[in-house]
Structure formats: C-alpha cells, structure tokens
Image (cartoon, coloured by chain):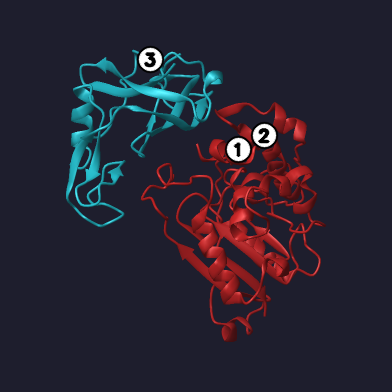
Amino acid sequence: MIVRRYMHDFNIDSEQFGWIPVVCREHGAKNPNSMYYQKPITIEDYRNSNMVVEPLRRLDYYEEADAAAALVITTMERAQDLKQEPACVLGVAQSMVAETEELNSYYRKNISALPEIAQVGKRIFSMAGVTTEDIDCAQLDDAYGPFVPMQLEALGFCARGEGADFCIKGDRIRLEGALPLNTSGGSLGEGHVHGMNHLIEAVRQIRGTSTAQVRGAMLVLVASGAGGPASGLILGGK
Amino acid sequence: MSVAYNPEHPIPVPPILWDNKGFWEGIKRHELVFQRCKQCGMWLHPPRPGCPKCRSFEKEWAHSKGRGTIYSWVTYRDSPHPSFKAPYSVVLVELDEGVRLVSNMIDVRPEDIYIGMPVEVVFDDISENLTLPKFRKVG
C-alpha cells in the first residue's frame, strides 16, 4: 500500500526499484557468509521476477534465513584493551510511530514518507556532529527494497521523491558511488537477520575487514525499522 | 472481479473486541459507522479507546455516507491463505469523512483500479457470521 502510494506521489515506475536488489546481490555475491555468495542478479532477472503482492516482485522481498549474529558493546576504555579494533557509536536513537498506532501506517495523513526514520536521522547526525556528506557508506533496512529510496529521502541523502532516481542504474549506491549501500548484501543480498547483519557489516567497514570494503571508511550509518518504529546509529573509528 | 473464497476452508473472521464491536454491529446491519470524537468531532478508524487529537475518551458511532476514493491498493498474485483465491485486490479507501478503511472491490478487474477512483460501500453477506464492507466503482 505504502509503495503503491509512493509510486503515485512521485511518478515512479516499479522497475526503478530493481536496482536495489541488483546492487545488494552484487555486494552479497562477494560475501562468503551470504546466502547469495557468487549469485548476483541482473536487472532483467528483476523484471522477470514474479509479482507477489503487486507492485512488489519476488526479488523486492527478503527470503527467510537462519543465522546468528552478536555484538560486544562496552566502554571505549575497555574496548581499547581488546584484540579487535573497536568501532565507536557516535550517535544512536530510536523513535516511536508518528500519527498512527499500527505497524503499517495506512491511516496517517501521508503514508509515503518515513517520519520515524527522519527523526532518527536528525538525532543521530546531531549527536555525531556530522552531516550526510560525511557518511562513507550506509546499511539501510532492505527487508523490502522499495523502502530503501524512502529511507534515503528521510535521512536527507536526497530530496523528497528523488530516492528512486538516486538508485537508478545503481552507480551511486555501489562501492565506488557517492553512498555505497548494504555492502554485506543486507537483507536482500546476504540474508534477513533483522538488521543485526547490517550492524556487524558497519563494524567491519570501520575495521576495514568487509568483503566489499569502501576505501577509507570512517563513518557508517545504519538504519532499521522502515515503516514502523525505527532506530539507527552512526559508527566511527576510535 | 471480487475476492473468490474457497468453500473448503473456513474464512478467517475479524476478532470482535470492546473497541470495534460497534463497527462490526453496524456492518451486520448494513450500516457503515465509525467512531467520532464527541469533544473535537474527529472521525476515527481503526476503532480505539481515545481520540489521538484531543485525548478525549468520549466518542460516538457516527454514520458514514459510504463514499470515498481509492487512496492506494495492492493485488495479491499469490494467496497468503487457503480461504482466498488469488488473484485479488486489497484497497485502501479514503472515505469522504476523512477516515481510511482496508477493503476489497466488487466487480472491478485489478488492472482497472487506480488511485483517486471514486467508490461507494456495498455489504457482502458472506456467511451467517460474516458480513464485510466492500466497495464498487461509482459512475
């Protein structure tokens, strides 16, 4: 419902969303932990992918995955004594839903925006004292691909309604692009671990140990909960 | 086209609770009613204990004219439940009173639905225990 309205509000063709799974799978294909290791897809595969709940195709959805993920969170003082290089939480926030009490926000005035993600973004950028320009890569909620452009807009990486154009052809969101996205593959290209893999990938980027490493990554943004209660953080080097 | 039901499987029925009892009693009588805040007059849906605008707990069941437009819609190409035969469309109708309702269309092909399409409510008596508000195209 939300995606259809978003397409209507900004004159977006559903095929434009295909670049998100294409790039996620491209990144996931490099990751030996991914369900899709060495299994990239093309935009043609996306176009030929079956409609499940129209306007969403099979390749817009994550697949169920069994996985485990863990993070050790401690003080910087302790972290510095540990074997692994620490990543530092520079800003973190979570938000409740706005103008609705349902997870799927069909009833609020405007359903094609993500005000919860916008609120999280505002808070974490201000806590970290950085702007969108400073972010080296982002790990966004891609359980459903079409929510990625909406997050780019809510976080201020592009203007309202320009998220799908931002992703078109995939060049801006690939490793050499302005904002590499979901470098482990994320939910669509690695496996759906409810954002835990996105957090771990952000740590790897800071440590320089990602299988799709962004050169010199110093600041990584993670967002979660697109379309409902949301959370996010900005990680940096120590 | 409407939703086709599979007679071999029981159709899931909406859970009727304290807040939404009035809504479903209205539907059974073929009347579309929504909560309206007695203090500020805001129409509310889905039913809830209090008004999110003025915080009042005083509300009444008010009659909707049953007319509105399609705000958004989706088409299930795969059925998520054995009772429903795919394909079928689910619509989000914005009533003239300002509230929205998730429903189905009657006598419309999925490809003919569009955002802004004018619709009006009809009542579908599916079984002894289940009447659902659905919509058809106006004009």
Q: Report the Cα–Cα distance between label 3 and label 1.
A: 33 Å
Answer yes or no: do the residues labelled 2 and 1 have beta carbons within 8 Å? yes
Q: Which residue is rendered at x = 63% and y = 85% of the image?
A: A81
Q: Chain of mark 1?
A: A
Q: Nearer the viewer, residue B114 or B74?
A: B114
Task: Tell me the tag on residue A7.
Answer: 1
Residue sitting at the far bottom: A77
Say if mark 3 contacts mark 2, CB within 8 Å: no
Instruction: State which quadrant residue A169 falls in.
Output: top right
Give residue A221's position: percent from left, percent from top: 64, 64
Give the crowd class for mark 2: few <14, some 14-19, many >=20 residues within 10 Å.
few
Q: Are marks 3 and 1 on the same chain?
A: no
Q: Is residue A132 left or right of residue B36?
A: right
Can see residue A199? no
The hue of chain B in the figure is: cyan
Q: Residue at x 21, y 42 (%)?
A: B19
- Around disc 3, counting alpha carbons within 10 Å, would you say few (fewer than 14), some (14 to 19), or many (20 or more)? few
